[in-house]
Image: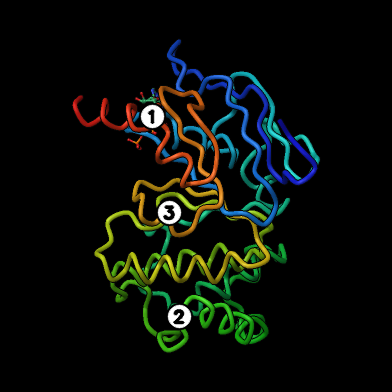
Amino acid sequence: MDDDRSILATHGLCRDFQGFRAVNAVDLAVAEGTVHALVGPNGAGKTTLFNLLTGFLPPTAGRITFAGQDITGQPPERIAARGIARSFQVTSLFAQMGVRAHVELALQAREGLGRRFWRSENLMRRFSAPAQDILAEVGLADLAERPAGSLPYGQKRALELALALALDPRLLLLDEPTAGMGLEDVDRTVALIARIRKGRTVVMVEHNMTVVGSLADTVTVLQRGEVLVTGPYEQVRSDPRVVEAYLGADVA
Ligand SMILES: Nc1ncnc2c1ncn2[C@@H]1O[C@H](COP(=O)(O)OP(=O)(O)OP(=O)(O)O)[C@@H](O)[C@H]1O
């Protein structure tokens, strides 16, 4: 399954929860430089697969390789250190702390300077300019001094993306980047992902098919823990098996 261009691949990946197989023999091949979407009806196993890829859950069976190395069973911090970043959750933001200070902290974490230096004035100054550049990349340059807690929802999500970008990842994993957003924020987020994907590989779980259609080069549809079909968006959306899986889910 894994060809020369895959940066991330899974081989027969499985995950059980008390005898229930949530992810079943998944072979995934993510080509470097592409946006690869994971979709599927509720309960298909997308979040579980995402958690396996980031090391938040160990697999029951199977292997995961990243950039040619076996990363199966490694803890999240080791996987992150190899260049895989996942978007942070809004809840991980500190309400009182400034927007740029968040990015400075993430840059500091990447250099592995540890908590001893947390918020030391000199160090923060060193990270100010690169942090400001990252904020510009996600459209938050003008809000750098604002407390993170004062940002509207869409901009909090943009800040999460900035924190993932601060790790300068080769692979960016986005968990429902447009979840809970109104139309305007969805459009802004699509434009943002289209910009930041350059030079990177992106794997995203996404429910909104318009978003998937605008961004994804490859779509993998999961159903009951298994890969139903993988291919380009246009091909996948008209695949009768996919139509049936979604209609079935709607009826249910
Ligand atoms: N910790 C757990 N313990 C037991 N069962 C679990 C656990 N996590 C997930 N499952 C089950 O595994 C299956 C897949 O769940 P998962 O959350 O991965 O699906 P999903 O595709 O992300 O769904 P959604 O789109 O609703 O988020 C579901 O049947 C779910 O109930």
Residue at image x 60%, y 38%? 55
Residue identified by numbered label 3: 213
Q: Nearer the viewer, mark 2 or mark 3?
A: 3
Q: Nearer the viewer, mark 1 or mark 3?
A: 1
Question: Residue 245, how many percent across, how many down?
Answer: 34, 27
Identify the mark at residue 139; answer none if there is no mark: 2
Please state which amino acid type lies under the numbered disc 1: Pro
188 and 146: which is toward the camera: 188
Residue at image x 43%, y 30%? 45
185 and 115: which is toward the camera: 185
Identify the mark at residue 6; answer none if there is no mark: none
Residue at image x 30%, y 67%? 153
Screen quadrant of the N terminus: top right
Which of the two discs, 1 and 3, labels the residue nearer the N terminus? Answer: 3
Left or right for 44, reference 184: right
Left or right for 66, reference 242: right
Please state which amino acid type lies under the numbered disc 3: Gly
User: How many numbered marks have been drawn onto this rendered protein structure?
Assistant: 3
The answer to whether residue 211 is above or below residue 139 is above
Q: Quadrant of residue 152?
A: bottom left
Describe the element under mark 2 as helix, strand or loop: loop
Give neighbour class at mark 2: few <14, some 14-19, many 20+ (Cα, 10 Å).
some
Left or right for 110, reference 189: right
| Image quadrant, ligand 1 | top left
Please state which amino acid type lies under the numbered disc 2: Gly
Residue at image x 44%, y 71%? 191
Residue identified by numbered label 1: 240
Describe the element under mark 3 as helix, strand or loop: helix
Give neighbour class at mark 1: few <14, some 14-19, many 20+ (Cα, 10 Å).
few
214 and 173: which is toward the camera: 214
Question: Residue 112, how many percent across, how many down?
Answer: 71, 62
The answer to whether residue 181 is above or below residue 74 is below
